[in-house]
Amino acid sequence: MLVLSEKSQNMPASPIRKLVPYADAAKQRGTKVYHLNIGQPDIESPKAVLEGLKNFPSNIISYTHSEGTLEYRQALADYYKNRGIDLTPENFIATLGGSEALLFIFGIIANPGDEIIIPEPFYANYNGFTCENDVNIVPVPSGIENNFSLPSIEEFAKKIRDKTRAILICNPGNPTGYVYSKEELIQLKDLVLKHDIYLIADEVYAEYLYTEEEFTSVLSFPELKNNVIVIDSESKRFSLCGARSGALISRNEGFLKAAMLFAQARLSPVEISQYIATLAHRNVGTYFEDCRTEYLKRRNTLVAGLQQIPGVVCPNPKGAFYCMIQLPVDNAEKFAIWLLESFSSNGETVMLAPGAGFYSTPNSGIQEVRLAYVLKEEDLVRSVELLKEALEQYPGTIR
């Protein structure tokens, strides 16, 4: 008998991508769609990367070591050294983006039925990664009224039990853009040490902060040598989403030995991706500063526009390139579908990511959407105009 696994039937759809068929249908009708649903930057990858692709120094695309090339892992170690964090190439295992790093981590530290505590809303694919590993998410809700700041440490403490294996944070936050302060991270540090669990930090947006405060990596706490695991990725750092290049980082030798077995089982990360990522790290120049300046302008443009729309609640994100906003609608997913199916102004519409998919608590985020400010300013201005006009026409707008 042909069957599908329970796991496959429980796998959640991505709120970022699930509406793609509606967008494709709109485009086939001749409608221009402004994509605010996905964090795909339109900023060019570094020139050294583009030149490297044209001049790859081999006629064979080969396997690499399962942990990644020494050149790439050394480039990562040097990158972190420039940020004041002392690591060696042995602390890195190259992965297919941050996604594979998360899949490895859940498979290494947790058995089926074990629990990971995560403040929500969170990066939507955490739902899928935990599902693939039969791990349960225990959410700690944060609120838009507090700009999605870290919930009280007492709320985390209440959730810890025998099956708890880790606390997972995304800093800077996807989807909220919130940046945890050093004081908030110290509270988490003390809690995970008290209970001897892992602190997993998804720090893939660490370069993109819009605050005078310095970014604090959990790798900067020496007491957490054995408890901290960090997810890294080149996707957003260098606008290399399609290269699928990233890494997991740890100083825990036992964890790294186990991770190597997972790395060997999938053979190797991609040779070309590691090669161009190494080139990017070796030729950074002013790339980060230039991108940060551009994203800051885009953030300011989008937030200012959204805050002028009646009924829209839009916190001011401190990092990454996302806004999690609340709309005056009955159901944000219905509204997002309506935008693609039924709304058009001068042949244009906008695509949003429904907020409910960034939660694991049922019936949360029903009126919220995530927007990515990865488009040029004039496109963001037009997107806000379209959103305002759509809210005036949508039958389910709450007035």
Image (spheres, rainbow, N blue to C red):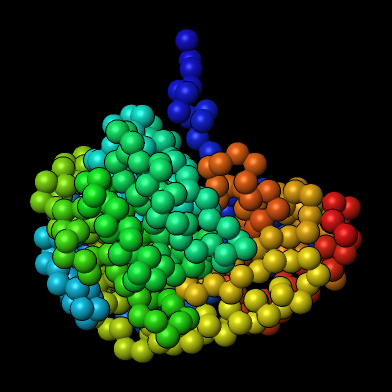
Q: What is the total number of numbered labels drawn onto the structure image?
A: 0
Residue 236 visible:
no
Image spot of residue 35 (x, y percent) = 64, 64
Q: Is residue 287 above or below residue 15?
A: below
Q: State the quadrant of the C terminus.
A: bottom right
Residue 191 placement, left or right of 260: right
| Residue at left offset 16%, top offset 47% | 255
Image spot of residue 126 (x, y percent) = 44, 47
The outermost residue toward the top is 1
Residue 113 placement, left or right of 390: left
The outermost residue toward the front is 154
| Residue at left offset 44%, top offset 70% | 179
Q: Is residue 282 above or below residue 230?
A: below
Nearest to the observer: residue 357 or residue 271: 357
Quadrant position of residue 391: bottom right
| Residue at left offset 41%, top offset 51% | 154
Image spot of residue 332 (x, y percent) = 72, 52
Residue 353 placement, left or right of 98: right
Q: Is residue 207 above or below residue 196?
A: below
Quadrant position of residue 374: bottom right
Image spot of residue 223 (x, y percent) = 16, 61
Residue 179 visible:
yes
